[in-house]
Amino acid sequence: MGRIPLVDLQAAHAEVAEEVELGFKRIISATAFIGGEEVAAFEREFAAFVGVPHCVGVANGTDALELALRAAGVVAGDEVVLPANTFIATAEAVARVGARPVLVDMDPASYLVDVDAALAAVTPATRAVVPVHLYGQLAEVERLTDGLAGTGVTVVEDAAQCQGATRHGRGAGSWGIAATSFYPGKNLGAYGDAGAVVSTDAALATTVRTLANHGGLAKYVHDLVGCNSRLDALQAVVLRAKLVRLAAGNAARRAAAARYDEQLADLDVVRPVTLPGNEHVWHLYVVQVPDRDRALARLNEAGIGAGIHYPTPLHQTPAFAHLGYRAGAFPHAEAAAGRILSLPLHPHITAAQQKEVVAELTAALH
């Protein structure tokens, strides 16, 4: 870990260490490792936090998105529209269902999906559109749902980076169904892989739970061809301990983002923007800078854990070269990929640390 880490997991653990240790002892003593009250309690608590009636814990965020797509009726041969600038897991989940990812460009100001482009990409073969709530704020879900009304196309939200974020007071999943990840570095992070699907629709949630439990809700009853993707009780202990602290942690992230906004105001950087109506939770603070690779190297050499999210748009990865998109197909995503830089931001970062980050970045840009 550098002097100033991108994400401080040690500090995050210190906050909950005693509570987690007691919870682990409780689970181990009862040998209640799979399912049980700890998982059920977390599902209730996270659903309440998000503001939806249903939550299904699963093994990881990629599974969560695949299961949400399957529950929404996406099958082999369907098309699913998603942005080119996202982590590969978004497209992986589509491909694992057997559907074809149809990529669209991003809005250059927010980095979120270009809603007009997404709606224009819908064809008779489209079964779902996946807006990605990138960096900690929600995409314009209501514009998608309005634009898709009556088409039979489902909006399945990729909410892996936005635990606690809202749009016009609504959380991810409140438009129907959303998948999230509790990878350790997320705002709400487990001590390993974990994820969940949240929904307003009881039938969708039941289908997800069925699929994730080998296709059945009772032992040796298999109504569907499912898989094994369950949130384990040890991870639920961690997530419950962290969930009660998440609102405060998100508030600390917002304060840190505001400090960066002020300190970077006079630099040759493009600062992030928050869409009107959004409450951002700042999973990442992403700027655009000239000569990004040199700036990144300078920061890393100084012990500052800056990074890139994400360096390569999906259509330029070897895994999805078969989709046939050429260079220049998504100019905003491609241009941003060469300039974006994620600065350290987490609930425990101090104003003094941020001044160091900005000082090193300033030096790198001159």
Image (spheres, rainbow, N blue to C red):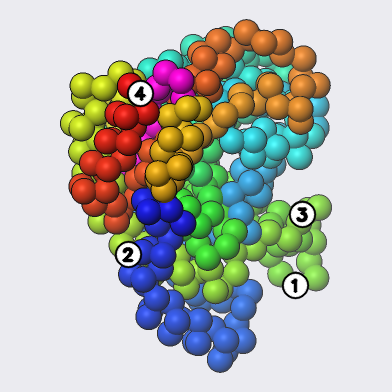
x and y, in percent, of residue 337 in the image: 53, 23
Examine the rendering and report whether any part of residue 283 can be seen.
no
Q: CA distance from mark 4 to mark 3?
A: 52 Å
257 is within the stretch colored magenta: no
Query: As shown in the figure, which amino acid type bears the numbered disc 2?
Result: Val
Q: Are the residues flagged by discs 4 and 2 in contact, CB closer than 8 Å?
A: no
Which mark is first along the chain, 2 or 4? 2
Q: Which residue is found at the position 53% from the left and 54% from the top?
A: 183
Cα–Cα gap, marks 3 and 2: 32 Å
Number of the front mark, 4 or 2: 4
Residue located beneath label 3 in the image:
226
Measured Cα–Cα span from mark 4 to mark 2: 40 Å
Q: Are marks 1 and 3 in contact (CB under 8 Å)?
A: no
Where does the image place residue 179, in percent across and percent down from the top left? 54, 45
Residue at 43% from the left image edge and 29% from the top image edge:
295
Which one is earlier in the sequence, the residue at label 4 or at label 3? 3
Which amino acid lies under the numbered mark 1 shown in the image of this protein?
Lys
Find numbered disc 1 in the image and state the secondary structure of the residue it sits on.
loop
Boundaries of the magenta span: 281-292
* Quadrant housing residue 243: bottom left
The amino acid at mark 3 is: Gly
Give the residue at mark 4.
365
Badge 2: residue crowd in 10 Å (few <14, some 14–19, many ≥20): few
Alpha-carbon span between mark 1 and mark 2: 33 Å
The disc, 1 or 4, on the residue closer to the chain's N-terminal end is 1
Mark 3 or 2, closer to the camera: 2
Q: Answer whether residue 180 is visible to the viewer in this image.
A: yes
